[in-house]
Amino acid sequence: MKKLLFSVLLFCCALLAQAQLENMLGEWTTIDDKTSQPKSVVQIFQATNGLYYGKITALFRKDADGLLCEKCKGADQNKPVLGMLIIREMKVDGNNLAGGTILDPQSGDVYYCKISLDKNGKLKLRGSLDKRGLLGRSQYWERKK
């Protein structure tokens, strides 16, 4: 009886974790930290390799057409910001996504990333210089309406 109860409890926990992850997928409006205005729309999706990625699908700037990531390094340098993958290789970590990176196209910097849903349904992204998330900052994105 205890084994059955434990199995049912474990199954329910797995379903809740999967539901949490499903709620993270889709389009999210990024919010500027300084102005509190929308900056862009990022679509978070699961790729065929099982990892999670995020791509910029819209920009709320007058000069969005032809905007290039001039400060980016490597393969992203001077590539169009619109359509750029900014979240890469995230893996499931309990109810969160972690283990990947996030790119700030404005500065060209790449940070370790952890993604979760807060109690209000906003997407919480923690970008940091270290894998543990101690040296960094958090940003909250809103579901696209």
Image: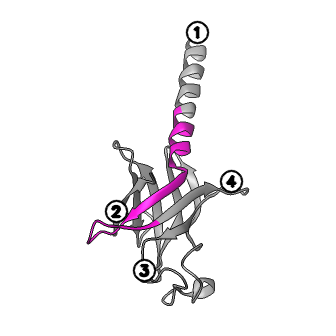
Outermost residue to the top:
1
User: In the rendered structure, which amino acid carries the disc numbered 2?
Assistant: Ser
State the separation of the CA atoms marked 1 and 4: 35 Å
What is the magenta range? Answer: 16-40
Residue placed under numbered mark 4 in the picture? 50
Amino acid tagged 1? Met
Which disc, if any, is residue 138? 2
Q: Nearer the viewer, mark 1 or mark 3?
A: 3
N-terminal of the pair, mark 2 or mark 4, is 4
Image location of residue 93, percent across then percent down: 53, 49
Q: Pointer 1: what residue?
A: 1
The CA distance from mark 1 to mark 3 is 64 Å
Q: Nearer the viewer, mark 3 or mark 2?
A: 3
What is the crowding at mark 1: few (fewer than 14 residues within 10 Å), some, or many (at least 20)?
few
Dot 2 falls on a residue whose secondary structure is strand
Mark 4 and mark 3 in contact? Answer it, CB < 8 Å. Answer: no
Q: Which mark is residue 96?
A: none
- The x, y position of residue 21, in whole percent, is 54, 45
Q: Are marks 3 and 2 in contact (CB under 8 Å)?
A: no
Number of residues whose C-alpha sits closer than 10 Å to that of mark 2, classed few (under 14), some (14–19) or many (20 or more): some
The residue at the point 60 percent across, 15 percent down is 4
Rate crowding at label 4 as few (under 14), some (14 to 19) or many (20 or more) other CA atoms within 10 Å: few
Q: What residue sits 57% from the left and 33% below the top? A: 14
Q: Nearer the viewer, residue 55 or 10?
A: 55
The residue that label 3 is drawn on is 62
User: Which of marks 2 and 3 precedes in the sequence?
Assistant: 3
Q: Comparing marks 4 and 3, which lies closer to the viewer? A: 3
